[in-house]
Amino acid sequence: MSALAPGTIPPNAYHEQAWIIGEPLIGVGTWIGAFTVIDGSGGLTIGEGCDIASGVHIYTHSSALRCISGRAYPSVDRQSVRIGNRVFIGANAVVNMGVTIGDESIVAAGAVVTRDVEPRTVVAGVPATVVATIDLTDTSHPKVRPLHVIS
């Protein structure tokens, strides 16, 4: 692979302004928006029919320990990420390494996902926590059921 000119993004099949590195496995019908960073360097699987909104960052690596040790810790840590089928990840959300997001889940805009998300769950916040469940009993009228009713 030849080096890219500074300021250029490697070409990909999803969006000309998405930066996709490594060799992630991305399912059929998945849409990836502009200004996303998709890091497949540590192993990444994204299921079928997902929507990855603009500005999302998905990381399969961390250089934090290497940095704080003054490079005495020589490694960049890597852990795979698995995103199930039909998962929606809202704008500017961050998914950290080692996380699994279950099928038919929603990650709210701006959420930072630091641990696994069960299927048919809605997470929001920093760090992301469960705020609702998803009822797909009638797929023509899906329902999001909040855990707490705000009055």
Image (spheres, rainbow, N blue to C red):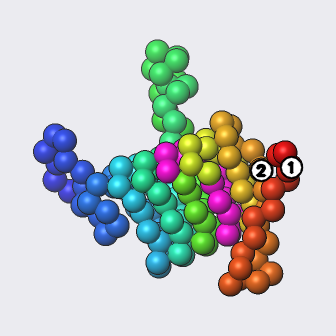
Identity, as a three-letter code, of the amino acid under mark 2: Val
Q: Is residue 1 left or right of residue 93?
A: left
The residue lying at 63 percent from left, 54 percent from top is 107
In the foreground, 37 or 144: 144
Magenta-drawn stretch, dominant element (helix, strand or loop): loop
Which residue range is magenta in the image?
A: 91-107
Residue 36, how many percent across, how many down? 40, 51
Amino acid carrying mark 1 in the image: His
For disc 1, the marked residue is 148
Question: With 143 as the anchor, is 4 left or right in this view?
Answer: left
The residue sitting at the top extreme is 70
Find numbered disc 2 in the image and state the secondary structure of the residue it sits on.
strand
Q: Nearer the viewer, residue 2 or 128?
A: 128
Q: Which residue is mark 2?
A: 131
Q: Is residue 79 left or right of residue 141?
A: left
| Separation of residues labelled 1 and 2 (CA atoms) | 7 Å
Please indicate, yes or no, whether residue 3 appears anywhere in the rendered image: no
